[in-house]
Image (spheres, rainbow, N blue to C red):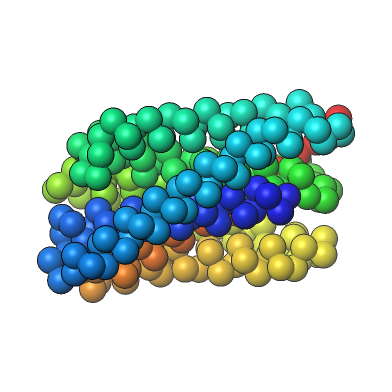
Amino acid sequence: MVLAAGTLAFVLAVIGASAYIRLGSAQIPAASSDSIDAARTVRKSAGALAALGVVALAIAAPAVRATRSALGAAAGGALAMTVVLSLVGVATGVEPPPAAAFANQFGGALLAGLLGWLSGRAAARLDATAADRALGTAALLFCVLQAAFGGAIATLLRDPPVALLIVHAATGVAAACCVAGLVPGLGRRGARWLAALLAVCAVSVPLIGVASTLVGITAQLQVAHALAGATLLACAAHVAGRFANYA
């Protein structure tokens, strides 16, 4: 669990640095070249450490006898995803085309979710009813959709249609509501730190989205939005992992 959580932290650092580089280079002229260079250094260093963490997970996960098949498959998937993202990065350089930028952003969010699930599956299991699992699955689905729409808006479309912006906002609110719905049950099961983290994420994601709409595009808000969305996805996946059956 500690290894997956540590690797997740480095992946989140990559996501935040990538968001700043993308916005600082293309949309925020006030961003200095020094700050962009620093963000590139953070992305490169955190990416290397995340890759090492994923390799370590792929080696260590199958050794957990009780959940060998599930953890081994997930860790293998994380390793495959890391290799693909690394190849895309090497092939497209520091200024990737829109399709590669989308693959990097959405792929990074999915990797964060997979690492969140791994850390949850490796942690102590939480008893869950069918309703709990359904709500957790819905939260995870809406988080993935929100990340996909957000990635498309940020990388593929310079002038996204209003309909897509509305769908992105709606899936974000739906994800936040589903995650918030998990909080009381987690608190009753003694997972108070997890409940508190989910509550913070569920509130911050829509608030940051609203602030971005009202204030306009700023590097700080967009980095915060990217980090909050990825963290929400990772938390929802973590809960899904802890709700999973071990049979």
**At 45% from the left edge and 48% from the top edge, which residue is drawn?**
47
Q: Is residue 60 left or right of residue 170?
A: right
For residue 205, which quarter of the picture? bottom left
The foreground one among 179 and 223 is 223
Residue 227 locus on image (x, y percent): 44, 59
What residue appears at the point 20 percent right and 37 percent down from the top-left corner? 97
Residue 15: x and y, percent? 41, 53
Residue 200 at x, y = what percent? 56, 69
- Give the residue at x 41% y 35%: 86
Quadrant housing the C terminus: top right
Can see residue 232?
no
On screen, residue 148 above or below 44: above
* Residue 33 at least partly seen: yes
Compared to residue 158, the image places residue 216 above or below, namely below
* Percent of width and height locating residue 63: 80, 33
Write down the quadrant of residue 156 in the picture. Answer: top left
Using the rendered view, name the quadrant where residue 96 is placed: top left
User: Camera-side residue: 171 or 107?
Assistant: 107
